């Protein structure tokens, strides 16, 4: 009977036996969205399809792998299991550098918002929401650092990065305020899609040195309602999500837009409104310098008439949040990387010595010590140490 098998089948069986290949479904628990593959993925003949370390960016990618009928080498699986786990915050699972995951979120959201009628739009937004929720909950300091330290010169990408920043801020605030999982998901989804109708326009305005034209101002004025319409076209039926998008520029004093609504404003819409104003203030434009995050948070709070959401924003971002530059009593310039036990004593990484000269490698300083106490904040500045500072996040993980 074996003699009747095609030649290719013999070849396939030979490879399966020699390489000890097993179906990928048998090790599906080792595949994590937002993490790299821990082993190589091969076809039925053992040919390499995806190399170990390939980033599984979305749940869709993860599901496609399991549906394709591909294989992995059992020996590679065993070797991976024999390795000590790599820590990513408090959870034990394979990881890639946080910055790479952050970039993956931006790429995915860019693709989704450009194709809102795609059948996979809703599942894609859910993937991005999940990644932001995990990042902001398990790695709050590093998320804040990434938000505050973003590249201010990437004006064309402003619409995407702004949506991500607002979503991250909302996720952090919702956690502090004890919101339910469902409400956190809603506010993140709404923040990611609030500017769906003007994503491209936001990039144009960020890199423009002039004021918006009359037509651009009109598009801005109606964008909450237009974004709701586009989301409905995309299949969104969650009324809380849609209401948060529609009301995210409305204010209790009636001075918001597009309708000037005063009453029955959802909490999600107001959280997005405060986060939107805050992140817009600390982001630079071609014709406007960025406001320091501490000043931006204080400004939002003072204008809020003591609103509890604005108060939470001030507590999270208003003193020395990760990513802000400070001058130490030692004369050194440092960047905050983790908040401390008290708001005024964060953990910092020194990037310039007391003479203002860049140092070879960032040095950790505990600002609770008198000799390294913070004297004041400094304007945002460029640094070549982002990769090294990411290592410091790993070294200082609890």
Image (cartoon, helix red, strand yellow):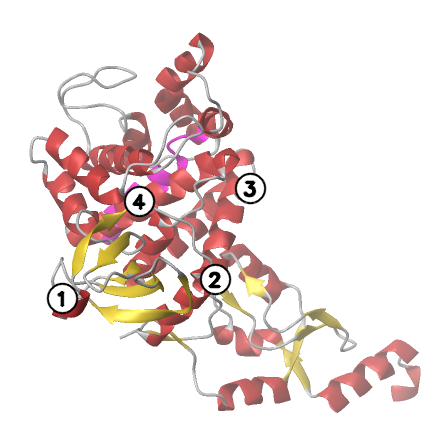
> In the image shown, does 208 or 238 lie closer to the viewer?
208
Neighbourhood count class around disc 4 (C-alpha, 10 Å): few under 14, some 14–19, many 20 upward: few
The disc, 2 or 1, on the residue closer to the chain's N-terminal end is: 2
Residue that badge 2 annotates: 34
Secondary-structure class at tag 2:
loop
Neighbourhood count class around disc 3 (C-alpha, 10 Å): few under 14, some 14–19, many 20 upward: few
The disc, 3 or 4, on the residue closer to the chain's N-terminal end is: 3
Q: Are marks 2 and 3 in contact (CB under 8 Å)?
A: no
Residue that badge 4 annotates: 379
**Cα gap from disc 3 to disc 4, whole angstroms:** 33 Å
Neighbourhood count class around disc 1 (C-alpha, 10 Å): few under 14, some 14–19, many 20 upward: few
Residue 182 part of the magenta-drawn span: yes
**Cα gap from disc 2 to disc 3, whole angstroms:** 16 Å
Q: Are marks 4 and 1 in contact (CB under 8 Å)?
A: no
> Magenta stretch: dominant SS?
helix
**Cα gap from disc 4 to disc 1, whole angstroms:** 24 Å
203 left or right, relative to 282: right
Which residue is rendered at x = 44% and y = 87% of the image? 84
**To which quarter of the image does residue 220 belong?**
top left
From the image, which quarter does the N terminus lie in? bottom right
Give the magenta-colored segment's residue range.
Answer: 179-196
Secondary-structure class at tag 1:
loop
Residue 144 part of the magenta-drawn span: no
Please state the horizontal and vertical placement of residue 358, each as a whole percent of the image: 41, 61
């Amino acid at each position: 009977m074996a003699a009747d098998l095609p030649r290719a089948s013999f070849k396939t069986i030979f490879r399966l036996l020699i390489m000890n290949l097993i179906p990928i479904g048998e090790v599906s628990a080792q595949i994590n969205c937002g993490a790299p593959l821990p082993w190589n993925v091969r076809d039925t003949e053992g040919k390499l399809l995806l190399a170990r370390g390939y980033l599984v960016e979305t749940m869709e990618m993860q599901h496609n792998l399991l549906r394709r009928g591909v294989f992995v080498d059992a020996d590679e699986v065993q070797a991976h299991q024999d390795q000590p786990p790599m820590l990513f915050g408090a959870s034990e699972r394979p990881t890639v550098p946080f910055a790479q995951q952050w970039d993956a979120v931006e790429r995915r959201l860019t693709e989704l918002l450009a194709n809102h009628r795609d059948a996979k739009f809703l599942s894609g937004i859910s993937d991005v929401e999940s990644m932001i929720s995990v990042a902001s909950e398990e790695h709050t300091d590093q998320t804040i650092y990434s938000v505050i330290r973003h590249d201010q010169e990437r004006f064309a990408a402003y619409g995407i990065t702004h949506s991500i920043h607002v979503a991250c801020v909302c996720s952090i605030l919702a956690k502090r305020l004890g919101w339910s999982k469902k409400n956190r998901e809603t506010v993140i989804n709404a923040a990611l899609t609030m500017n769906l109708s003007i994503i491209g326009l936001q990039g144009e305005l960020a890199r423009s040195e002039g004021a918006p034209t009359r037509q651009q101002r009109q598009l801005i004025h109606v964008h909450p309602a237009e974004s709701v319409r586009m989301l409905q076209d995309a299949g969104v039926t969650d009324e809380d999500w849609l209401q948060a998008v529609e009301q995210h520029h409305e204010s209790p004093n009636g001075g918001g837009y597009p309708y000037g609504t005063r009453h029955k404003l959802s909490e999600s819409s107001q959280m997005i409104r405060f986060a939107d104003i805050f992140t817009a203030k600390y982001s630079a434009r071609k014709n406007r310098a960025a406001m320091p995050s501490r000043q931006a948070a204080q400004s939002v709070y003072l204008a809020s008439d003591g609103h509890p959401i604005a108060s939470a924003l001030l507590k999270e971002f208003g003193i020395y949040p990760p990513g802000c530059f400070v001058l130490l009593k030692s004369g050194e310039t440092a960047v905050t990387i983790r908040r401390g036990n008290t708001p005024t004593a964060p953990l910092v990484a020194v990037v310039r010595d007391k003479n203002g000269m860049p140092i070879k490698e960032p040095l950790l300083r505990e600002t609770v010590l008198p000799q390294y106490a913070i004297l004041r904040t400094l304007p945002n500045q460029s640094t070549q140490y982002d990769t090294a500072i990411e290592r410091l996040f790993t070294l200082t993980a609890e």
